[in-house]
Amino acid sequence: MRIVVVGGAGTIGRRLVPALRSRGHDVVVAGRTSGDVHVDLTAPASIEGMYQEVGTVDGVVSIAAHGALDEFTTLTPDALLENMRAKFFGQVDLVLTGQHYCTDRASFTLTSGIFADHAWPHVTGGGVISGALHSFVLSAAIELPRAMRINVVSPTMVADSVDAFAEQFPGMRPVPMDQLVDHYLRCVEGDDNGRIIRAYG
């Protein structure tokens, strides 16, 4: 299968892309500043341009965007909207636009996060974004045309990022990277549809 991995040069992508290739998939890495093709998830024209450049694909995996930390007492609607541009609206647009470019039975795999289910300080935006992604996936799963599928992987802190994020999330148990990669592979290669896969270690 021909798979586009948006954010494939990042922490998860560095493990997922080789795993996909080892299983015989033709992988195209897309990113804002690196990869085989350019895409900016905050710009709808860039998303459409990516699909036009890549051509027909059998699957799209999004592991690109991260929500910013916030301070609730000073959080504004504008700041929340800005936080949502890539991680929520960008991932949604990958599906809304991608349905017109992907093959029959193509799969979309999005990425949310633990804060949809577990409250944590300074991540109100992350919780809102992830919860919204879960609702979008549930709805899209029953409306995507041509037997297309959609799922979302919701990880906690990933093991390969502990050094970078452990101070911000003390006590959070990381998910092993092999386990996380297996979840993405199942979404691409399996027959699940409308699943929220909680990869919480």
Image: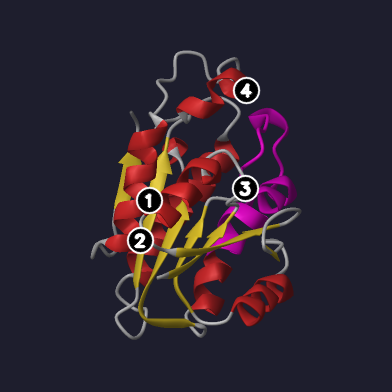
The earlier-in-sequence mark between 3 and 2 is 3
* Front residue of this view, candidates 3 and 193: 3
Q: Does the magenta stretch include residue 78?
A: yes
**Which residue in the structure is indicated by mark 4?**
164
Q: What element carries label 2?
A: helix
Q: How far apart are marks 3 and 4 (CA)?
A: 17 Å
**Which residue in the structure is indicated by mark 1?**
184
Q: In this view, does 60 lie to the left or right of 70?
A: left
Question: What range is drawn magenta here?
Answer: 66-91
From the image, state whether disc 3 or disc 1 is nearer to you.
3
The earlier-in-sequence mark between 4 and 2 is 4
Mark 4 nearby-residue class (10 Å; few <14, some 14–19, many ≥20)? few
Residue 201: tell me if it is visible. yes
**Which residue in the structure is indicated by mark 2?**
188
Secondary structure mostly taken by the magenta-highlighted segment of the chain:
helix
Please give the label number shown on residue 9: 3
Q: Distance between the residues labelled 4 and 2?
A: 28 Å
Q: How far apart are marks 3 and 1 (CA)?
A: 15 Å
From the image, state whether disc 3 or disc 4 is nearer to you.
3
Q: Where is residue 140 in the image (x, y as percent from the top left)?
A: 38, 71
The C terminus appears in which quarter of the rendering? top left
Q: Is mark 3 on a helix, strand or loop?
A: loop
